[in-house]
Image (cartoon, grey):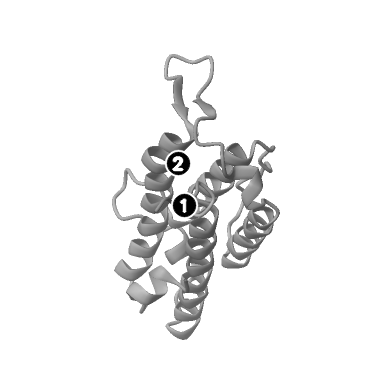
């Protein structure tokens, strides 16, 4: 049995971004209930040289929309990455999920050998086929940033667990 490129990508992005939105909603409620300034969570880092929560969410979104667009050979939407509130992060997730929903399986399936060029024209340029790009680059990057966002909130007392992280599937 084989799995399609579409099945291994867009539904996974949808599941995890939806779950991330739910985790962010719990974080906002936690801040309100505990009388914590939202920025204490939004600007939280696990270590000083790591990105804060807001940036972790933005990067996770970038990988989800970028990979989806590349695999479907469509233009990825450009976002300003100017979010500063929970509401703005929720809006970012919503518009990303709406974009992903526009991509159909037939736009992605069969593109496994499509060449994806990362950082074109730079010394770090890398050429991968779409399957390798998805499985060995995009998904690991995406999961790293979603997991780090979850971990930041859990570390700061937000009561979330594995079911929250996984969401519905």
The one of 89 and 100 positioned closer to us in this rendering: 100
Locate residue 32 relative to residue 105 in the image: left or right: left
- Of marks 2 and 1, the one in the foreground: 1
Upstream in sequence: badge 2 or badge 1? 1
Report x, y in % for residue 45. Answer: 36, 55
- Residue position marked by numbered label 1 in the rendering: 8
The one of 17 and 156 positioned closer to us in this rendering: 17
Which residue ends up furthest to the front in the rendered image?
1
On screen, 110 above or below 99?
Answer: above
Q: Are marks 2 and 1 in contact (CB under 8 Å)?
A: yes
- Based on the displayed image, in which of its 4 quarters is residue 123 positioned? top left
- Estimate the spatial distance between the alpha carbons at disc 2 and disc 1, rounded to whole Å: 8 Å
Report x, y in % for residue 35. Answer: 46, 81
Report x, y in % for residue 1. Answer: 39, 53
Residue at image position (48%, 71%) is 37
Badge 2 marks a residue whose secondary structure is helix
Residue at image position (36%, 39%) is 136
On screen, 136 above or below 54?
Answer: above
Please tell me how many numbered marks the rendered image carries: 2
Q: Which mark is residue 134?
A: 2
- Based on the displayed image, in which of its 4 quarters is residue 131 positioned? top left
Locate residue 73 relative to residue 134 in the image: left or right: right
Residue at image position (42%, 19%) is 124
Residue at image position (60%, 44%) is 108
């Amino acid at each position: 049995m084989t799995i399609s490129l579409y099945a291994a990508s867009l539904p996974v992005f949808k599941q995890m971004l939806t779950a991330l939105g739910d985790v962010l909603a719990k974080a906002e409620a936690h801040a309100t209930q505990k009388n914590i300034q939202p920025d204490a969570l939004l600007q939280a880092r696990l270590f000083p040289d790591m990105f804060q929560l807001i940036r972790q969410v933005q990067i996770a979104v970038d990988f989800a929309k970028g990979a989806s667009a590349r695999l479907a050979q469509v233009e990825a939407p450009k976002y300003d990455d100017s979010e500063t509130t929970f509401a703005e992060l929720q809006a970012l997730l919503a518009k990303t999920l709406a974009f992903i929903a526009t991509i159909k399986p037939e736009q992605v399936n069969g593109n496994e050998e499509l060449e994806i060029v990362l950082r074109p024209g730079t010394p770090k340029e890398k050429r991968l086929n779409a399957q390798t790009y998805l499985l060995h680059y995009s998904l690991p990057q995406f999961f790293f940033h979603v997991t780090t966002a979850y971990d930041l909130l859990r570390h700061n007392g937000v009561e979330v667990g594995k079911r929250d992280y996984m969401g519905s599937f």
